[in-house]
Amino acid sequence: MSNFFRFPTVLMATLFASAPSVFAAEGGHKLPLYSESVLGPISNSMLMTWLATGIIVLFCRAAAGKISHIPQGFQNFAEWLIEGLYNFFGGLLGD
């Protein structure tokens, strides 16, 4: 392998190893250990999980609205996306 392709990797490794304070959060702290409370017992992590779940449910309901044997429109996009993800993770994880 030529030195041209190795240089960015070496540069990034040096940057991450030698200057961790550059990547620290404001105040010199690293990532927080616990989630922040947004509203009483509801944390920011719980809120984002609900939001992601809602988006996935809406996507699935929209894709399964008018199912046909020959997919068209949004159903075609949804089948392409799901099949692509299935093949991608199948290639990574194996059958």
Image (cartoon, rainbow, N blue to C red):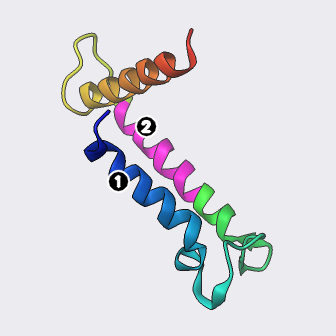
Q: Residue at x 65, y 86 (%)?
A: 28
Quadrant position of the C terminus in the picture:
top right
Secondary structure beneath disc 2? helix
**Residue 19 drawn above or below residue 7:** below
Residue with the mark numbered 1: 8
Crowd tier of the residue under label 2, counting other residues whose Cα lies within 10 Å: few below 14, some 14–19, many 20 or above = few
**Quick check: 39 left or right of 72?**
right
The mark nearer the N terminus, 1 or 2, is 1
54 in the magenta segment: yes
In the image, farthest residue toward the bottom: 27
Quadrant position of the N terminus in the picture:
top left
Magenta region: 50-63
Query: Relative to the observer, which residue lies in front, 25 or 53?
Result: 25
Secondary structure beneath disc 1? helix
x and y percent of residue 15 in the render?
48, 66
Q: Amino acid at mark 1?
A: Pro
Query: Relative to the observer, which residue lies in front, 50 or 95?
Result: 95
x and y percent of residue 46 in the render?
68, 62
80 in the magenta segment: no
Where, by quadrant of the figure, is residue 32 drawn?
Answer: bottom right
**Residue 93 drawn above or below residue 27:** above
Q: Residue at x 73, y 70 (%)?
A: 35
**Quick check: 54 left or right of 81?**
right
x and y percent of residue 36 in the render?
72, 76
**Residue 95 drawn above or below residue 5:** above
Residue with the mark numbered 2: 61
Distance in Å between CA atoms under marks 1 and 2: 44 Å
Query: Relative to the observer, which residue lies in front, 61 or 27?
Result: 27
Where, by quadrant of the figure, is residue 29 drawn?
Answer: bottom right
In the image, farthest residue toward the left: 72
